[in-house]
Each structure stands twice: as structure tokens, then as C-alpha cells.
Amino acid sequence: MAVVLGLIAAFAYGISDFVGGHTSARFNLWAVVAWGQSLALVGMVVALPFLPGQLTAAAGIWGVLAGIGSGVGSIALYRGLAGARMNVVAPLSGVLAAALPVLFGLATGERPHPIALGGVVLALGAIVLVSLTRAEDTPGRSSGVPEGLVAGLGFAVLFVGLQRPGGKTGAWPLLLAEVASVTLIFTVALLRREALRLARGALPGTVVSGALAFAATLLYLLSTRHGLLSIVAVLVSLYPALTVILAAIVLHERSTRLQVTGMIGAAVSVALIAMS
């Protein structure tokens, strides 16, 4: 169950990042991020009664921490997707988003099956390969490296923060994370005096990206209730492969041979994890 939920979450994240990044590049970046996250918060309020649990101190602390990570990661990711190449920013964010939770999980006593651990190692290598691109492919544009690194760190905090409170807290950690994320994004935008008016043309992309991001995060939360953090976080962090594929199809961004090799490695890693 954890593998299935994690993979569906990865697909949802990948499509959300592509749609949100493409919309941000054409319209107001801050408006797309802010209102997309607000939509996710509304979705979480609606979903909360269906995932009852106890509101504990741990849920509050870890939920807020996860929300801060989500807010920082979302701002950095969308800045990178809007101003650099998608096939650099998204994969690079996936490297840290996968590696740090794996290290955290192993440090806190998780011991995956040897075959699954082999799949995790292969997946991490695959994500690294997908993140590689030639510098000459991005003339006159941001490299996307700083944004990708900050986004990956933020999402790693999100993944760890949502997993730590445990299943008895229901969806409370995610609700508090959404509140913290929206609060952070709006606060930063207002301090920067960014316009938050959403253009009519940006509405479809904002709704799709926000709804998919909410669905992906909810699926990730559910998957952690059925599997190890060191496994689930890696599966979910395969989302950049889909973003790269969509960027190649829609935006005609060329993928290198190493990136294609990485995507093949990602498929093999999923098979190994599913076998365990």
C-alpha cells in the first residue's frame, strides 16, 4: 500500500510542479504560489473530518515545522521553475527531498529490507542523474541550482515533519502544516510588497497545481502510515522524472543521456522496492 500511495503522490507532485511552474513563468509567480497553497488549505479543512485523530503537542510542533519547510520549498521551487530550466530545478530538489529523509529514517532506527535498500540507493542515484544538465544548455538564465537546493531542503523538512507525529494524530499535522505554509507565503509576499492579484488566465493552472499538490501531500501522509520514511520519501521524490518528461514534451526542453539513464534507473528502483 505504501508503494502505491507513494508513487501516486509522486505523479501528482510531478504534474503539479510542471503546471504550477509553467503558469508562474507566464503570470505572477507570488499569486500562483499563494493562492495555490490557499486552495490546498481549503482542501485540507474539508478532508480533516474523514481522517480523525488527536491534536497533540507533537502534531502541532512537527506540523508547523513541516509547513515552514513546505512554504520555503514552494517559493524556491516556483521561482526556479519560472526562471530556469524545469529539468534542472525539479530534479535537484528531489535529490535533497529524498536523501535527507532517508538519512533521518536510518538514524532513527529504520531498517529496510536489503532489496528495498538497494532500490533506495538506486533511486537516489537516479535522481542525481536526472538532475544533471550541461551548463551551456541554460544561457542567459538562472542555473536553477540555488532554487533547487533550497526547495529540496524545504521539502525534506516537510516529509520528515509530517511523518514524525504518527498515525494517531490523523490529518492534524497536515492541516497545521498548510496553515503555517500559507501564513509564511503571504507574510513574505506582503513584506516584499508583491502583488497577489491572480490574473484570470492564471486561474486554471493555479487550481490544478494547488489541487494536485494537496492531493500529493495527503497521499504522502497516508503512505507514511503504511511504510518506512526511508522508503516512502524516496518514492515520492521521484516526482522530478515526470516533470522532466512533461517539460520535454510540452516545452521541448532536451534531456541529456544521463537524465534518460536516471529515469530508467528510477523505474528499476521502484521495481526493487515493490519486490521487497
Image (cartoon, grey):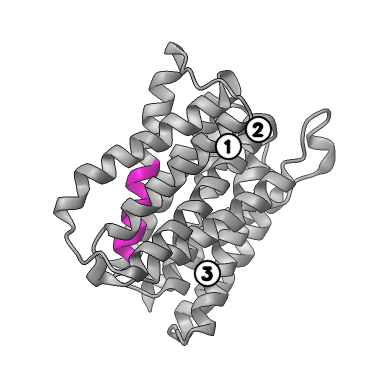
Residue occupying image coordinates x 49% and y 50%: 70
Determine crowd level at label 1: few under 14, some 14-19, many 20+ residues with C-alpha closer than 10 A. Answer: some
Q: Amino acid at mark 3?
A: Pro
Along the polypeptide, which appears first: circle 3 or circle 1? 3
> Which residue, given by chain and number where applicable, does mark 1 sit on?
188
* Residue closer to the observer: 72 or 275: 72
Q: Amino acid at mark 2?
A: Glu
Image coordinates for residue 114, horizontal then vertical, percent: 48, 85
Residue occupying image coordinates x 57% and y 31%: 189
> Which residue, given by chain and number where applicable, does mark 3 sit on?
101
Along the polypeptide, which appears first: circle 2 or circle 1? 1
Q: Where, by quadrant of the figure, is residue 137 drawn?
A: top right
| Helix, strand or loop at mark 1 | helix
Please tell me whether residue 164 is drawn above or below residue 221 in the rendered image.
Answer: below
Along the polypeptide, which appears first: circle 3 or circle 2? 3
Image coordinates for residue 211, horizontal then vertical, percent: 34, 37
Asked whether 219 falls inside the magenta stretch, the response is yes
Distance from Cα at disc 3 to Cα at disc 2? 30 Å
> Which residue, given by chain and number where applicable, does mark 2 sit on?
253
* Residue closer to the observer: 66 or 216: 66
Instruction: Provide the residue span drawn in magenta.
Output: 213-223
